[in-house]
Amino acid sequence: MKSCIAVVSIFVLLCQGFFVQELSTNKPDAAFQEMVNKVKRASFQHTLKMLSLMHSNNERNGIYGSLNFLVSFLSTMNAVGKEGKNETLIKLLNFDKFFTSFDEATNVFANPMFQKLLTAKSVVILSKDFEVKSDYKNRFNNSPFHLYLNVDFQTKDDREKDQQVIRNEVLKLNNTAFADEKEMLNNFTLFFELKEEDIFNMFSYSNYTAKFAPSFRFASAKTLEGAFHSQGSQGYASFMNNKREYNYSTTDDLEGIKIPLESGDALTIILPKKNVPFGKVLEKLGYEAIDEILRKMSPKVIDLRIPKFPNSSISTKNSFFGVNGFDNYFSKNVTWKGISDTNGLYLTQLTMANYIRFEEETSIFERRRPPGGRQMRIIVNAEYPFVYFIHTETGICLYGAYVNYF
């Protein structure tokens, strides 16, 4: 009997040792976790800055594909840069708060672990005056980003021919493109128009399909029309309603609710607690506020009432140079010395097209009692402008957007 007990004890100890070893080997590497934290902060800070600029430019329901654009832009700059000569760019991007050097930033975003985070498609097109080293051509061909070189829109014939090629390539990225998306691309006229003084132009396109996780879906049949208040006026939107357990947190001025997506990413909606000018909402919403909301998330029974997301949200941004504050990021008046062999590199036009498709048409409607019996419910009613983010499990921002108009 004693021998049996001894054998069992040894077996249990071995299992415990194996389990502890498994836990230790599965711990995230400290350097990698530090990288995650840096990218998380940089992606949210950059997104918030761009959303503020969009709002100051009177954009309605602005969408910004943050990580896709950051990776493509940094990689593109790295492709033509001289080693050790790109520090000016990182300061223009306001990344100097998070990365000690341009090389560190590009190494982080080029890491294969982060390449897998790019769930959206992206296209980057460069003007004919932009030269890229051959080794980087191969890199781009094998990445989620498609690089177009020698795009010359100087003549009408060339312009029509090249634009059609680009439309076809973009459509290839999404085999399930919907009619409205195809129509948008076929009628897209905001391609580069090169001028003699232009040196660099850029067009970025990204596509993301957001499906709520099965048990969190809404039923379109349960939508009801309601008032949506924005900037002193009132419009009407179709509101989705559901009552269930969500991850929820609150601060003095804001409240956040997180809805898991089928892809493993999450949609976090951040709303003001009272009707305040939307510009002030964006001012209050710094990275620290977002981080606090995400960290304090806990399961709560929520009675959620939120406007139905449009099936297609297409936002095209073209040339922010007239917007106050944009020079902190890009400026046609600043020469990026050392990036090119000529007189420097100027960004003269930036066009971003972002497409997010939320799916609710085939979703289910659940009103089930959460575990633990009756609980005090929290009512979340998104009838004022709000911000939402699509982010990874680790909190790295993929998309940022605001809803301020219906």
Image (tube, rainbow, N blue to C red):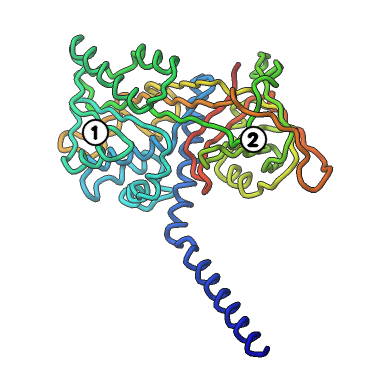
In the image, residue 152 sits, relative to residue 371, either above or below, namely above
Question: As drawn, is 361 to the left or to the right of 76?
Answer: right
Label 2 sits on residue: 216
Contact (CB < 8 A) between labels 2 and 1? no
Q: Residues within 10 Å of mark 2 (few under 14, many from 20)?
A: many
Q: Quadrant of residue 3?
A: bottom right
Q: Nearer the viewer, residue 104 or 147?
A: 147
Question: As drawn, is 144 to the left or to the right of 53?
Answer: left
Residue lying at 36% horizontally and 11% vertically, measured from the top left: 187
Residue 252 drawn at (x, y percent): 71, 41
For mark 1, give the secondary structure.
Answer: loop
Residue 65 drawn at (x, y percent): 44, 32
Residue 363 drawn at (x, y percent): 62, 28
Name the amino acid, label 2.
Phe
Name the amino acid, label 1.
Leu
In the image, residue 6 sits, relative to residue 188, either above or below, namely below
What is the C-alpha distance between the residues marked 2 and 1?
47 Å
Q: Nearer the viewer, residue 272 or 298?
A: 298
Question: As drawn, is 389 to the left or to the right of 160?
Answer: right
Label 1 sits on residue: 345
Q: Quadrant of the C terminus?
A: top right
Question: Quick one: which residue is furthest to the front in this view?
Answer: 1
Give the mark, 2 or 1, whose residue is nearer the N terminus: 2
Question: As drawn, is 387 to the left or to the right of 328?
Answer: right
Residue lying at 51% horizontally and 33% vertically, measured from the top left: 400
For mark 2, give the secondary structure.
Answer: helix
In the image, residue 112 sits, relative to residue 317, either above or below, namely below
Residue lying at 54% horizontally and 71% vertically, measured from the top left: 20
Q: Quadrant of residue 193?
A: top left
In the image, residue 284 sits, relative to residue 181, either above or below, namely below
